[in-house]
Amino acid sequence: MSDFVLPYAAPRAVAPPRRRRSALGGFLAVLAIGLGGGLGATYYSVSRNVVFGAVEAGPWTAWPRTGALDADPYTRASVARNGETPLGLGEGLVFTARRDSAGRPLLAQCAYRVVGRAPQARYWTITAQTPNGQLIANPAGRYGFTSAEIVRGQNGQFAIEVAREARPGAWLPVTGSGRFDLVMRLYDTPVSVTSRVIDPATAPRIEQVGCP
């Protein structure tokens, strides 16, 4: 009796249903959009030095959480990119101005006057720096002023002249052209970090006094 062998037929590939393909494609699209959006937000925050929890005083803005142990990842990345050591919450506050009191961007080719009183602090400094956080090199070798050396008028206010050309009084040189920042550091200050807006009258004004 001969053995009977059934003919072998290779299994046929079964195409996935269109609905399954569509669902998979939609999931991948959403994943790509989410990933791209997250990376985009991270790049924007780090490259523009955008951190959260700002405290404002006129044209000046401070981010108290930059020196906190529980600072958010965007803040940590921004600080690491600049290479600057932030002040701890118990040490003081760092205020940055990227615009004058009229809301115009600070430009090195223009001249400004920083006038008024600094918020209450045991010691403070005002410096000029690039948007990347670097001090602005200049032939005069002057990078800022401190509360110990600034001269005040009879009304208790001070004035700092920020310009490329030499000015009488407290002259803070800038060079080149394009945008720059003014940075005010307050050491041992009672200014509350829980307030989101501080009375502008307690912070120096930044007035544009000339621009070609």
Image (cartoon, helix red, strand yellow):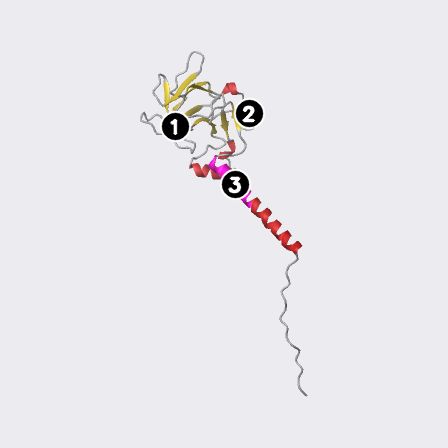
Query: Dividing the picture into quarters, in which one does residue 152 lie?
Result: top left
Which residue was labeled with disc 3? 40
Q: Please name the predominant secondary structure of the magenta segment in the image.
A: helix
Based on the picture, tell me whether residue 63 belongs to the magenta stretch: no
Residue 202: % across, % down: 50, 19
- The vertical placement of 177 against 113, above or below, is below
Based on the picture, tell me whether residue 41 belongs to the magenta stretch: yes
With 146 as the anchor, is 35 left or right in this view? right
Label 2 close to label 1 by CB (< 8 Å) = no
* Badge 3 density bin: few <14, some 14–19, many ≥20, Cα 10 Å: few
Q: CA separation, marks 1 and 3?
A: 29 Å
Residue 137: % across, % down: 35, 29
With 17 as the anchor, is 92 left or right in this view? left
Mark in front: 2 vs 1: 1
What kind of residue is marked 3? Gly
Q: CA separation, marks 3 and 2?
A: 29 Å
SS assignment at label 3: helix
Q: Which residues are magenta?
A: 35-48
Outermost right residue: 1
Outermost bottom residue: 1
Which residue was labeled with disc 1? 177
* Badge 2 density bin: few <14, some 14–19, many ≥20, Cα 10 Å: some
Residue 135: % across, % down: 38, 30
What kind of residue is marked 1? Ser
Closest to the observer, 181 or 25 = 25
Looking at the image, which residue is at 51% across and 38% down? 74
Which residue was labeled with disc 2? 197
Mark in front: 3 vs 2: 3
Query: Dividing the picture into quarters, in which one does residue 142 lie?
Result: top left
Looking at the image, which residue is at 61% across and 51% down? 25
Closest to the observer, 197 or 174 = 174
